[in-house]
Image (cartoon, rainbow, N blue to C red):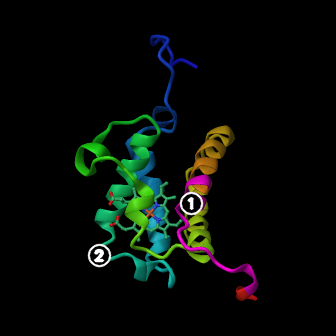
């Protein structure tokens, strides 16, 4: 795919969704959900969720082909290591994905782009789980 009248440079997903404003909207919607979530909200160390929203926005922009501002400010993402201080089990993962699903839906993206974005977010959320739970213990 090429952008109209442009070179043969492939269009990144970052460009295809409309660049930074779309990622800001996604993450703002997501954090509006986190702010009211009894499981997730207490996990965030800062009173103000704004800086956390900024970090997630910059990370996602960079991942999808936008500017490398995240790494310029924070270094290598190492996301599993950065999440190690937080207990992330199935309930935390599912709560995170619940708010992210709503946020993705609010963007009204073309279905194939929404699917690509969602598949990544879902995979990444499963990857971030860092506690082993005994399935027999839960019920
Ligand atoms: C699975 C459930 C998840 C939970 C409960 C969770 C929770 C958290 C918490 C509590 C923080 C600290 C807030 C901050 O200081 O920024 C954080 C940071 C962050 N999370 Fe997650 N997270 C989850 C999944 C993900 C996923 C799937 C991604 C990426 C696709 C992600 C990307 C980030 C980034 C980029 C940061 C900031 C890292 C930094 O630069 O310090 N998180 N997360």
Q: Is 79 left or right of 132, judged from the image as shown?
A: left
Where is residue 67? Give x, y as percent. Answer: 33, 36
Q: Is 136 left or right of 71, judged from the image as shown?
A: right
Q: Which mark is residue 46?
A: 2
Where disc 1 sits, the SS reads helix
Q: In what quadrant of the picture does the C terminus appear?
A: bottom right
Residue 107 versus residue 13: which sits nearer the camera?
13
Q: Say few, some or many: other residues with alpha carbon within 10 Å of mark 2 (under 14 / 14 to 19 / 20 or more).
A: few
Where is residue 14? Give x, y as percent. Answer: 46, 37
Residue 83 versus residue 94: which sits nearer the camera?
83
Q: Residue at x 67, y 38 (%)?
A: 112
Q: Ligand 1, what quadrant?
A: bottom left
- Residue 42 in the image: above or below residue 99: below
Where disc 2 sits, the SS reads loop
Where is residue 46? Give x, y as percent. Answer: 29, 75
Instruction: Tell me which corner region of the image, top left, top right, bottom left or bottom right, holds residue 92.
Output: bottom right
Q: Is residue 128 magenta?
A: yes
Q: Is mark 1 within 8 Å of ligand 1?
A: yes
Where is residue 83? Give x, y as percent. Answer: 42, 65
Q: Is mark 2 within 8 Å of ligand 1?
A: yes
Q: Is 112 left or right of 120, judged from the image as shown?
A: right
What span is colored magenta in the figure?
123-136
Q: Residue at x 24, y 43 (%)?
A: 72
Q: Which of label 1 and label 2 is nearer to you?
A: 1
Determine contact: label 1, label 2, CB under 8 Å: no
Q: Earlier in the sequence, mark 1 or mark 2?
A: 2
Q: Which residue is mark 1?
A: 125
Q: Residue at x 50, y 72 (%)?
A: 33
């Amino acid at each position: 795919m090429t952008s109209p009248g442009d070179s043969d440079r492939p269009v990144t997903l970052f460009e295809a969704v409309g660049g930074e404003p779309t990622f800001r909207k996604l993450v703002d919607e997501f954090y509006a959900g986190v702010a009211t979530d009894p499981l997730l909200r207490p996990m965030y160390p800062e009173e103000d969720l704004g800086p956390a929203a900024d970090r997630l926005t910059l990370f996602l922009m960079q991942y999808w082909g936008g500017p490398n501002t995240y790494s310029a400010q924070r270094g290598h993402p190492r996301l599993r290591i950065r999440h190690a201080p937080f207990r992330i089990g199935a309930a935390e993962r599912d709560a995170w994905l619940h708010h992210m699903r709503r946020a993705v839906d609010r963007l009204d993206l073309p279905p194939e782009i929404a699917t690509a974005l969602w598949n990544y977010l879902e995979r990444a959320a499963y990857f971030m789980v860092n506690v082993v739970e005994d399935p027999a213990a839960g019920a």
